[in-house]
Amino acid sequence: MSGLRGTGVSAGIAVGPAIVVERDTAPVFRLSVAPEQVEAEVGRLESAFELSREQLRAVKERLSREVGAPHAYIFDAHLLMLDDPLLRDRAVALVRTDRVNAEWALRCVSESLHDLFSQFSDAYLRERSTDLDDVVGRVQLNLRGSEEAPSLQRLPGPVVLVAGDLTPSEAAGLDWDRVLAVVTDVGSSTYHTAIIARSLGIPAVAGLKQATRLIPPGVLIAVDGTRGEVVVEPSGPALAALQEAQEEFRREEERLRGTRALPSRTLDDVVVRLEANVEFPEEAATAQQHGAEGIGLFRSEYLLGRGLRWPSEEQQVDVYRRLIEQMHPHPVTVRTWDVGLEALGPSGPSSPNPALGERALRLLHRSREPFRTQLRALLRAGRHGPIRIMFPFVSGAADLRLALDLLDEARSGLRSEGVDFEDDVPVGVNLEVPGAAMVADLLAPSVDFFSVGTNDLIQYLLAVDRTDPRVSALYEPLHPAVLRVLGQVAAAAQASGRPLSVCGEMAGQPLEAVLLVGLGIRELSMAPSAIPRVKAALRAVSAERARDVAGRCLLLPDRAEIEALLRRELPAEVIASEPARRSEATRPRG
Ligand code: PEP
Ligand code: MG
């Protein structure tokens, strides 16, 4: 028996025989092409691109049919990448200028794009190299006249799939009914395969580095996607313990799923709206399954994903419309681009401290176009249902005015062009810079709603870098200063009649969620999977009791005393609804 540790990217436990995916890595030769053969070689390359496009469309359609339309979205990006002049036109140009074979031209262009991707500081964006490999690999296979890896579509019985890197195309072609679990050498939770596995409820562990080397094909392996562990050839007792844990997980999931239809209401009938935070449109389905009453935060910058390219107005309208339709009749709150300088181009200036530098609305001073396009798309999407626009990283009234002026400009532009749009889309501010939170009362007349981004608010309020594990112990959601600011914001929102939500990770922790309700907050937005536990906690306590406890917390001097009071004074069911405590999620930002 031996164990491997990676990142659990899809919860649950599964045990089964391993099947190790070996990728076809045929060598690519460099051949020179005679001048009179060059155009034929270009034709060969173009045909391979064309065939790849047809295959991708078919994969996308199949995925829509079998798994649901939102998952097929991944392949829109592949289709876009396939047509990207940076890939296709440059490869064609290379065949002509260097008179080389199509395979070699494609290899050269893909290598230079990999170099470009590797310069990105954002791990998510760097991971898009995988998409490039997927697209280029497909074209290379088509150049060789090969079939797409057929074994993945005909798996030999229920198996645990072990792969170096499972590309989205491969994931889409998979015979998922026979996959018990997936483990990969690379990847993290933003890995596309992880997203698909999560949506399908299949346990997955990514980032194992050496799984394909250390796991012999055919052996029994146990995958714990909750803890990020893989046990190779588990001993009898270990296997029994894992199977027991597997059963327990199943029972707990079933129990929590049962709360989906239950109202999110405290014992004294105070309604608390629970919404979901999503990064990818395909997560909307998961949000619904967990009982989300809307999307409280769509981190739109994830749409830039592959290749850090701004999606067009049409592409955005399409994404926002699909989100609205999927969540109907609940609202979808889209946060406008929360990106750093790197989004304006890899060769541009960089920020010495991106968390405090030119980011989000501050980029308006350099380039208005991406924001104008996004606002136009949001206003247009508003025709299809309830959507809300939320501006991040606002530090005060001046920032907000700039954004609102641009929104007015977008409205006038659409109106003069005769384009259909919704005039009355609610506009809000993500309160995450302490300065803005302190003047929420002054911002209130200009906005329709507020949402507190506690992830950043805590980092800025306590001067603790949320991405630095060395200071993570100082990152305290229950710090008295955090509670005071939240209490002040809640009072300002109430006085001005503006709805207020909290969309940081804090909202997804049962104990903290009850405290937030005690402070007067009635909307919470969180990772979809956190919703059932938070709902269970809220249903076990009265708002009255939460208010009383929160009031006493506000008088205490430090986190330890506040936490102790919460644990002592809140009903046992609230404490029981907590998952195993984890450090506050501190997603790195780009
Ligand atoms: C926040 O800052 O709390 C937030 C919700 O946004 P992000 O984590 O994307 O910064
Ligand atoms: Mg933030």
Image (cartoon, rainbow, N blue to C red):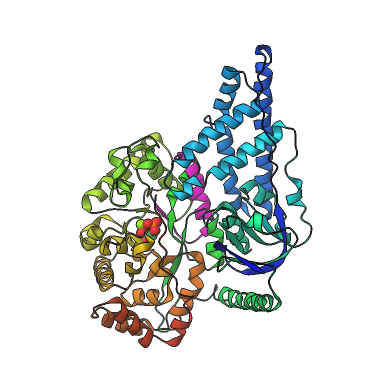
The boundaries of the magenta stretch are: 308-336
Residue 283 seen in render: yes
Nearest the viewer among 140 and 169 is: 140
Image quarter for ligand 1 equals: bottom left
Residue 383 seen in render: no
In magenta segment, residue 318: yes
Q: Quick check: 95 left or right of 151?
A: left
Q: What is the x, y in percent for residue 66? A: 69, 54
Nearest the viewer among 167 and 61 is: 167
In magenta segment, residue 392: no
Residue drawn at 40 percent across, 61 percent down = 586
The answer to whether residue 346 is above or below residue 578 is above
Q: What is the x, y in percent for residue 585? A: 42, 64
Q: Quick check: 118 left or right of 169?
A: left
Q: What is the x, y in percent for residue 383? A: 45, 49
Nearest the viewer among 119 and 340 is: 119
Nearest the viewer among 333 and 339 is: 339
Q: Quick check: 586 left or right of 437?
A: right
| Residue 434 in which image quadrant | bottom left
